[in-house]
Amino acid sequence: MTPEHPIRVETHGRVGLITLNRPQQLNALNDALMDALGAALKSFDADPGIGAIVITGSDKAFAAGADIAAMADWSYMDVHLDNFITRNWETIREIRKPVLAAVAGYAMGGGCELALACDVIVAAESARFALPEVQLAMLPGAGGTQRLPRAIGKAKAMDMCLSARILDAAEADRYGLVSRVVPDAELLEHTLALAERIAAFSLPALMAIKESVNRAWESPLSEGILFERRALHARFASSDAHEGMHAFLVKRKPEFQHR
């Protein structure tokens, strides 16, 4: 893959790794990158040999927002007719397998929103999170005003969106924005190890858990409980679930077939 390609793609056992690759632009997210990212996510999601996906950037930046140079002269009709953001930024919502973000350096604007769209965020100590769109007389439009309050609560989300406040990794961890914080030198190793641990479990169970947790974000408690109960009942149709329970009873390691 040439250096000019906006992403790099690798596999590590049952883990797919996608690296954002616009270093000169601090991985600013333009259409070409988001198209390539969506295609890679869909490819890994369709690959039966992959159980989890990791998205990462560089040491300096996970992604420093949308590509403002590309957007500065767009009109309303340009973005409306092109279905801006919805057309390719929302592809990640279609992915059924767990998606982890390994974040170092800047995760600003669209970069922060991309991380928020992932299922697990592992942050390096250097990570910085912000939604600074108000400084451009804009607003977070790739899910930031919707996902951030669900992650950290209304008060802190309002603070970040209205004042362009930057959170360091420790604050992001304390607020519940990230899943865990690790030293910079250990970020990718730690995230890949976590992804490999996740991917070793039964894939149908992982997908059911992800779908159930996401339902908790998007529905009342009573609806979420009903959805969870039906997902649990469906586990009894899975050969992996029976393998897991029988292996537990005889104290051996289960051998999941992802069925």
Image (cartoon, grey):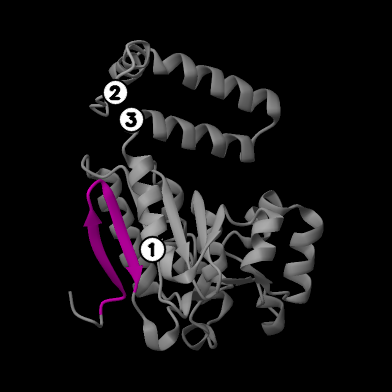
Q: Nearer the viewer, residue 195 or 112?
A: 195
Secondary structure found at label 2: loop
- The C terminus appears in which quarter of the rendering? top left
Residue type indicated by callout 2? Pro
Secondary structure found at label 3: loop
Residue type indicated by callout 3? Ser
Q: Residue at x 66, y 76 (%)?
A: 133
Q: Which residue is mark 1?
A: 188
Q: Residue at x 42, y 65 (%)?
A: 186
Q: CB atoms at circles 2 and 1 under 8 Å apart?
A: no
Q: CA distance from mark 1 to mark 3?
A: 23 Å
Q: Earlier in the sequence, mark 2 or mark 3?
A: 3
Q: CA distance from mark 2 to mark 1?
A: 27 Å
Q: Earlier in the sequence, mark 1 or mark 3?
A: 1
Q: Main secondary structure of the magenta part?
A: strand
Secondary structure found at label 1: helix
Residue type indicated by callout 1? Leu
Q: Which residue is mark 3?
A: 202
Q: Residue at x 63, y 40 (%)?
A: 217
Q: Which residue is mark 2?
A: 254
Q: Is residue 254 above or below residue 92?
A: above
Q: CA distance from mark 2 to mark 3?
A: 10 Å
Magenta residues span 5-20
Q: Is residue 167 left or right of residue 5?
A: right
